[in-house]
Structures are given as C-alpha cells and as structure tokens.
Amino acid sequence: MNKIYAFIDSQNLNLGIKNQGWILDFARFRIYLKDKYNVSKAFLFIGYMPKNKKLYKLLQSYGYKLVYKLVFESKRKSNPIKGNVDAELVLNAMIEYPHYEKAVIVTGDGDFYCLVEYLKKQKKLARVIVPNHYRYSALLREFIKDIDFMNGLKKKLRIKKEGH
C-alpha cells in the first residue's frame, strides 16, 4: 500500500472555502482525504495563537498532525494577524520526503509552485487540491491535470448547522 501524506496550507484552505460562502468541517475533510486519496498522514500548517489551544486539540483529535507557525500581530488594519506557513510546509514536505511515496498538497498558493514541480518531476506528486477554482494562482495552472478543486464539495464537507 502506498504511503500518501497530505501537506495542508490551512489559511489558504480556510479562506478559499469561506470565499465560496461555506465553512469546512475539518473532521469530514480528514476522512475525505483518507477515503479519496488514501492519505495516511495529514500535516496541517497553521498559525499558533495561545487562545486557540482548544481548536488545536480538536484538529489533532480528527487525525491531523499540526505544524505551527508563530503568529505576530501587526498594526495594519487590513491584515492584523500574520502567520504565513509557506516555508514550514515546504521544509516539512522535504523532511518527510523519504517517508512517503506520494504527496497531496492542499493549497491554491503559487508560492508552492517549486514544491509541486519538484514532486511531479520525482513522480511523488499524488494531487494538488485547490480550495477555490476561482481564486488560485496562475502559476499552478501548469499542473491542471494534477489538480482537484473543492468547489463541488460543499454538501459533503461543510459544517452542517443543526436541523439541516
């Protein structure tokens, strides 16, 4: 059986889904990764803020291995919290490289072009999962045959409100 690891840009995933008007159920998403892509380990790259400890424990209980980025708050009103996980995701994908046969990369961010390109050349790219077909980097279009979009997954992966 192939060892398939997922490397997930949580901010890109979260924003890409929210821009479609729904909220991702992370528990369901982890099951989806296992069922559809046979993902045995899912690394979730997320900004660390002490006030979110309950959320982190919950995500771990769903089966994610969390990799934290220290977050700092800036004075800018447009983006007061900064926690870019790009370097951590690429670094960890390379640290884990000997341990997986294929990788699933979850992002629409063009900053991961070099990682996707390298994994593809090494025949280690399983898929790129892009959260939003309408908002992703043109740099990734070169890999369109390797991309799955999440736009049609609202019914399957959204948080369901009680009574619905």
Image (cartoon, rainbow, N blue to C red):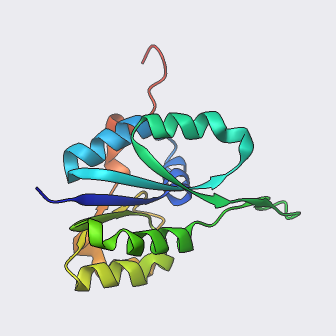
Residue 22 percent coordinates (x, y): 49, 40
Name, please, the residue furthest toward the right.
75
Q: How many marks?
A: 0
Q: Relative to 122, is 25 above or below?
A: above
Q: Relative to 15, is 95 above or below?
A: below
Q: Is residue 162 visible?
A: yes
User: Is residue 51 rendered to the left or right of residue 86?
Assistant: right
In the depicted view, which residue is nearer to us: 93 or 9? 93
User: Is residue 143 rendered to the left or right of residue 26?
Assistant: left
Name, please, the residue furthest toward the left.
1
Residue in the image at 26% along x and 52% along y: 39
Residue in the image at 45% along x and 69% along y: 92
The N terminus lies in which quarter of the figure? bottom left
Residue 70 percent coordinates (x, y): 69, 60
Name, please, the residue furthest toward the top.
163
Residue in the image at 55% along x and 74% along y: 87
Residue in the image at 34% along x and 35% along y: 155
Q: Is residue 128 visible?
A: no
Residue 147 percent coordinates (x, y): 29, 67
Residue 121 percent coordinates (x, y): 24, 86
The C terminus lies in which quarter of the figure? top left
User: Is residue 102 rendered to the left or right of residue 130?
Assistant: left
In the depicted view, which residue is nearer to us: 89 or 126? 89
